[in-house]
Image (spheres, coloured by chain):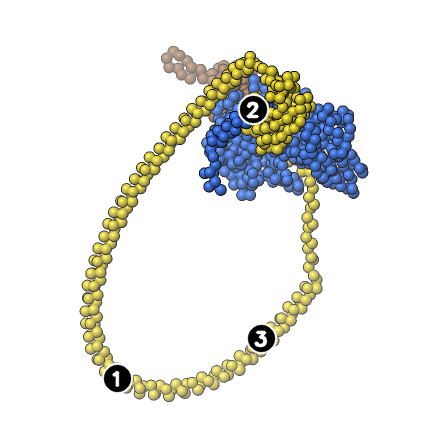
Amino acid sequence: MNFSAQSKAFALLLSVGFVAGCSSTGGTSEEGGEYGSDVAAVDQEGGSTVYGGDDQDGVSSSAMTEEERMAAREQAEQQALREVTVFYFDFDTAEIKQEARDVLVAHARFLANNPGQNVRIEGHADERGTKEYNLALGERRANAVQRFLIVNGASRGQLETVSYGEEKPAVMGSSESAWAQNRRVELVFE
Amino acid sequence: MRDHQREVTTTGVPPWKSPVALSVTLHLLILGIALAGWSWTSPVEEPSPRSISARLITQQEPEPSPVVDPVDQQKRDEERRAEEQRQREAAERQRQEEEARRIAEQKRQEEQKRLQQQKEQERQEAAAKEQEARKAREEEAARKKAEAEAKERARQKAEEEKRRQEEARRKAEEEKRRQEEQRKREEAERKRQEELARQEAERKREEAERKLREQQLEAQAEAAQRAREEEARRRQEAAAAKAREAQMLSESEKYQALIRERLSQAWYPPSSATEDMTARLQITLLPTGELSGVRLVSSSGNTAFDNSALGAVRSLSRYPIPNDRDTFERYFRQFTIEFNPRRLR
Amino acid sequence: MTHWIWYRPSRALLAAIALIFFVVSGARAELLIRITEGAGSAIPVAVVPFAESGQMPAGDKVGSIVQADLTMTGEFRTLPPEKMLSLPSRREEVYFRDWRLLGQRYVLVGALTRSGDRVQARYELFDVNREERILGETAAAPASNIRSLAHHISDKVYEAITGVPGAFSTKLAYVTLDTANGKPRYRLQVSDVDGKRARIRLESQEPILSPAWSPDGEKLAYVSFETGKPVIFVHELATGKRSKVADFPGLNSAPAWSDDGRSLLMTLSKDGSAEIYRMNLESRQLTKLTNHWAIDTEPTYDASGEGIFFTSDRSGGPQIYHMETPGAEPRRITFGSRYNARPRPDNDGEYVYYVHQRDRAFHIARTELKTGEETILTRTESDESPSVAPNGRMLIYATRQNGTNVLTVISADGGAAYSLPASEGDVREPAWGPLVR
């Protein structure tokens, strides 16, 4: 597997942080007792006391805050959405369907956050009708997806479009279901 | 952090076992391993080669490469010899030049002595001449002054006159310029007004044309509609006429219909036949119904079409005719057949 | 010449004189029978196997090639030789009564003679009912080219009977698709009009589309995906040399030649949407001919060589449009269906042929340009790529039959269909070559 310098540095930092989090364990129990007496009241005015404590060195951070939990969930959702890289269309139209929008937004955000990531947008059509018109229709579908991604954050330089018309069907056959599966745009990440 | 350290020491844990020190050393270890073991360069991303996956079927022969000659050793030797010769010749030349210089120097010195003697004589003569010349100059100078003064007066007068004349010319020119400018302005104005008038006229013309075209299109649409309505009327009338015919069918008409049917089935009009092609043939029959003669009375203009009509007529070996001899003689002894396709699509 | 018209009596006067004459002579008005409809079926023709003297090259016989040619048009029904009562090879041997009995309208007889490496054909065509010879010729060709000799005879026979020049000596270009080593293999091929003598011109693992013949029949323009995107090439058939003429960003597709062979119409999308351009092939200069956000593609010159037919979906779905002159305001031609595409006009300016959707099926249809009348020509249901024969009498198109794509020839008015035998895999994108004199 090839890693870029960026991701290696990131991994190194992560491991450093992880190791920093769990350093030696000897003497913790004894320190615990002393800690208790060390916690000093910071503010003694009035009747209230505020206890300020130093960072609890020695406790492994397995407990996450609410914010962190939500962020992790969102990231997982976005990743799941991005599993989908094929989008389907109705006959003789390049209109992006409602169910595709969230997925495309997820892709657009991913591309916005990873400017080095390039993607090729391949447009297709089903076999009915004429080849040349289908070539233009495939391109129109690819352009629609391209525009959508740009509007939602991707930059033009990351995107490349190509149309194959009816020449590269995903499913062979002359049934409604085969045709429906061939009227598509595919995202190919490079 | 200080508190931590104090805490640790009071509980009696040796300094090098402290958690901080341990963690620091671990960090350093890891850093060391990482730096030593990992490469810091990112792999160069090569674009996947888009090999041209097409293959031409015809072959072309490759061109032969040109041949290069090696340097000749002989030439080098020759060049060396030539250089040596040049050097020798140059040394000779130098010696010759030096001698010539010595001789030239001697000659110069002798000449100089001669020149000095001549100069002395000339100086004495020149002094005497100079005195005479001084007298003559003084006299001339006086004459010239008087002349110069006179000329100056004359020049001044002439200049003044010139100035007056020039001023007069300038005034005249300016006047002309003013007049010309006025004329130009007036002309420009006239032209502008003419242009405006022309543009207006054009606009009106274009509008008139547009209206004409609109009217023409409307007229065409109306004419097309009328034609369609007429066609519908014709078809209705034809159907009605057929019904009438069926009622009034007489003997001769029955046989006419039969002949028409048989000939239709036997006629193969060429595929290029159009509705305006009409061929007329005159038929002569024998009382048996056999064909006695065919004559092309009027051609369709298309040979293939005419031939198809002739072929159809000749393909019937016997024509259906009424048994009654009088009816036959009257209608079927000689009659005309006209071939003219009507498309029913 | 115009002067003597003044002295011609008017028609009314002539009619009056004629009427008087008839009344005086007592002649009856002659019966007139009008025939307005023909048999509506194919003309029966007998192609008698030619007599042979000398060694004939192996392969199909001249007679059977002529028979197949005439049958392909849908306008003729040929008599199987086993039903013939005699096998004449010259006029003296022809008994017209026999052929009449067999219901034949025309009979073709001939003889082939081999001399050296050439074959000579002497042939005659007879009208059975008129008992007249309507065509007689001697033609010769190298023995290796005997198929061309047969097609030449078919051209002459067709023209003698119908008055229209035959298109049997023309070529077809088309694309086949099969698999080799698990990968798709596209091949651009050129063959005779009956599919024989096919020669591969280009082989690729990526699609090849839209072959288009130059007017002199010497070059093909086509779209190839060999570089990963659609690019237009011009390919010289005699030398195999080809040049890339359009490789702009986006689409480079749908090439169509001008009548003088100097420029190509094409569809490019480099300026945003698919538009039609004209490219001068020498200077490579482009002229933009359409300017609309819709898809404008599949351009082709009309019979006049100046106007242009094309497909556009500016009205919502693809329809056929026509520009009187390049760049003029387009006029819509098709109305009856929501999908009409890929116009191909005939050379006479009478009809334009195209792909037409009716209910759920895609047929080939044609519109008569004078009247606007539309007719559906095919019963097959997934039709594509119509191409008109240069004599306007036949049409070839691609369709699906039993799960594979095949080429079918029909007569221009939709009668009779003749499927070209497909040797390997899938055949598509037929283009009918020009008449070459």
Q: How many residues crowd mark 3 within 10 Å: few (<14), some (14–19), many (20+)?
A: few
**Numbered disc in front, either 2 or 1:** 2
Residue C28's label in the rendered image is 2
Inspect the image, locate mark 1, and give the three-letter code of the amino acid beneath it: Ala
Judge by depth and name the residue closer to the eye, B151 or C83: C83
Q: How many residues crowd mark 1 within 10 Å: few (<14), some (14–19), many (20+)?
A: few
Chain A color in figure: brown
Judge by depth and name the residue closer to the eye, C183 or C106: C106
Q: Mark yes or no: residue A67 visible.
A: yes
Q: Which chain comes out blue in the rendered image?
A: C
**Residue under the point 64% across and 40% down:** C437
Picture coordinates of residue B110 (x, y %)?
47, 85
The kind of secondary structure element at disc 1 is helix
Quarter of image, res B55: top right
Q: Which residue is mark 1?
A: B136
**Residue under the point 29% across and 42% down:** B194
Picture coordinates of residue B315 (x, y %)?
67, 25
The kind of secondary structure element at disc 3 is helix
Q: Is residue C311 left or right of residue B139?
A: right
- Considering only vertical position in the picture, is A76 above or below C328? above
Q: Earlier in the sequence, mark 1 or mark 3?
A: 3
- Considering only vertical position in the picture, is C292 above or below B139? above
**Numbered disc in front, either 3 or 2:** 2
The reply to whether callout 3 and callout 2 are in contact (CB within 8 Å) is: no
